[in-house]
Image (tube, rainbow, N blue to C red):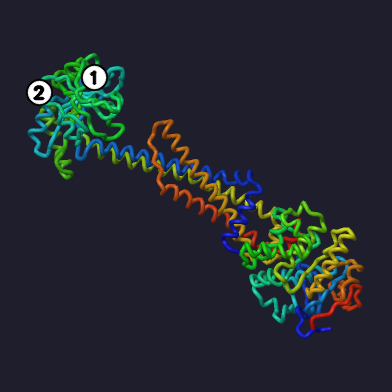
Amino acid sequence: MTAPLPLISLRSVCRTYRTDGVAVAAVRNVSFDIGQGEILAVMGPSGSGKSTLMNMIGLLDLPSEGAIYLEGANVAALSEDRRSVLRARSIGFVFQSYNLLARHNAIENVALPLVYCGVGRKERMERAERSLEAVGMLHRAHHFPRQLSGGEQQRVAIARALIASPLIVLADEPTGALDSRTGAEILALFAALNQTGQTIVMITHDPSIATQCRRTIRLHDGELVSDETQVPLLPKRSMAS
Amino acid sequence: MTMLQGFRIALHALRLNPLRSFLTMLGIVIGVASIVTVFAIGAGAQLRLQEQIRSIGANVLMITPGAVYQGGVRLKEGTKLTMTESDVQAILEQIPEIQAAAGSIAGTAQVIHESKNWNTTINGTTTGHFMVRDWQLASGRYFSGAEEAGAGKVVILGSTVAHELFAPGDDPIGAQIRIMKVPLEVVGVLDRKGPSQDDVAFVPLTTAKLRFLGSASGINRDSVAYIIAKVAADGQMAGARSEIESLLRQRHRIPGGQEDDFKVQDPAAAMEAQQGAIRTVALLLVAIASVSLLVGGISIMNVMIVSVTERTREIGIRRALGGRMRDIRLQFLCEALVLCLLGGAIGVVGGVTLSMTVARMAGWITSIDGEAIALALAFSIVTGLIFGFYPAHKASKLSPIEALKTE
């Protein structure tokens, strides 16, 4: 399953939190690779370390032990600022609760990562329009988050995750706050994005979502218990390499 | 993220809560407004004094009556007019450093020209008075010798009085005006010397004594209320002063050990001392005003800390989307700076308005200079940086993971 150059490699990754002198291991000795163009579900009950794992893949957190390589580079060796820049350019986050800035309209929210990439205002707005169009939300560009439905907000959030053409989109329970029909639409959007070659990692505890992904990693008590590639229910796509 | 983007984000955030933003910057507004006002009033007071110093003339000594003994009782200074016209003559003739000298008596009276009238100071003096004070004529002439000797019915007007009694196109020279029912011919109008100096009408000393002020208590035919004398050069002031003192003691037959019945003053020097006092008071007031700037800074810090707490999630989102710690710090620092600068600008406008109102209502002279405004604005920038730094630093140190978890 290992691609010639894995996008992301986890090697014996452990993450231990120390609260009141008691060490709690959230992630223990996890190793796997994520290849270019993959769509991957990370499953597990709550407290199994899914979010911790995603924070580390998203460069928000560092492993206590082991190493994570992004395009071959050990992320622990990068400075805090460098990791921030990489988050802006290479990682697209999609959250369960959308996490749009309430006081900015849709297009400003979508353009936000580009502020931290040093892109000028005019170009930001043009690219934000294209990104909104890609998720079918251009007609809501000047609406504020509170004026949008949950599904619409999540589409805006996906547009924001895509705007800097990231290496990988990390989605943490992207359908968790949505009804099943809207959730299905969002999943279809992710599937369509994956068809264009976008690498996506999706965290979920919903098995029906996991079945729509080609590959599923299961975590339990911070340990990797299974890593399966299955025949997808989605139409099979041809991979780049 | 650039500074400009930081300011744009800050303005956006502050516009969303205008009342709160305004209340936050109120301390700065008040502080800056008071600094600007105090500066304006202080500078105005100094200007007024400088003008007075200038109007007295350079190297002028003023001799006024001192306290006198009358049967062992010390009377109030000026109760008795102790100087005389012959004292003036003696000073002029016997002290070589004195270029010019003149005695004066003064009172106030109504001056009338046709349908207009005006209350002003009537100063009875000799032409020497204008020489001492380097006071030039705008038109007409000074008193003639005959007028001075013979109580001529002539008057020289200060520019304020001329302005009050005559219409703009009207030539006052040759016109008849009346003072206490006495008709007088205007022979001269003086140059401007300053608002506090120009409200005066001069008549010959003899005229004043005979026709207006002679019946006032303590004025005999020879006495004058005060003498002004011009010393030739700046370095001779002290020498001339002591010579006048010994001359007058001798002329007034004051035994050794007894107090002088006159006082010799250097009004310009006294006013310079007063100027120093005004500067000290103004600085003190500025220091007090700066305290309100400090309080304003603290209130900004307070609101910024609350704001950082409220917007923890926003900070988390911005960090996750690639904002560096320094970007977050810049964002919040810009907010504090914008608050201070905006507050400072409103304060400058308020201070200028206030000092102009004070100038109009109280009749004080105020002077607004760019330096005071620049200083006040610089103060507010420094306040913004000092009190904005801690909340901004706090915001930048938040862990993005923790920040994203907060509701």
**Image quadrant occupied by the C terminus of chain B:** bottom right
Viewed as shown, does residue A147 lie left or right of B187? right
Quick one: which residue is furthest to the bottom in this view? Answer: A4
Q: Which of the two marks, 2 or 1, is nearer to us in this view?
A: 1
Q: Quadrant of residue A98?
A: bottom right
Residue topped by disc 1 = B177
Decide: few, some or many residues near mark 1? Use Cα within 10 Å; few <14, some 14-19, many ≥20: many
Decide: few, some or many residues near mark 2? Use Cα within 10 Å; few <14, some 14-19, many ≥20: few
Q: Considering only vertical position in the picture, is B234 above or below B78? A: below
Say if residue A25 shows up in the picture. Answer: no
Q: Considering only vertical position in the picture, is B121 above or below A119? A: above
Nearest the eye: A1 or A13: A1
Nearest the eye: B387 or B173: B173
**Image quadrant occupied by the N terminus of chain B:** bottom right
Q: Position of residue B122 (x, y in %)?
A: 24, 23
Residue topped by disc 2 = B146
Q: Secondary structure at mark 1?
A: strand
Picture residue at 53% right of the left edge, 51% below the top: B341
Q: Chain of mark 2?
A: B
Picture residue at 28% right of the left edge, 24% below the top: B166
Task: Report the amino acid beneath label 1.
Answer: Ile
Q: CA distance from mark 2 to mark 1?
A: 20 Å
Picture residue at 64% right of the left edge, 68% below the top: A117
Nearest the eye: B191 or B45: B191
Say if residue B210 shows up in the picture. Answer: yes
Instruction: State whether discs 2 and 1 lie on one chain.
Output: yes
Task: Report the amino acid beneath label 2.
Answer: Ala
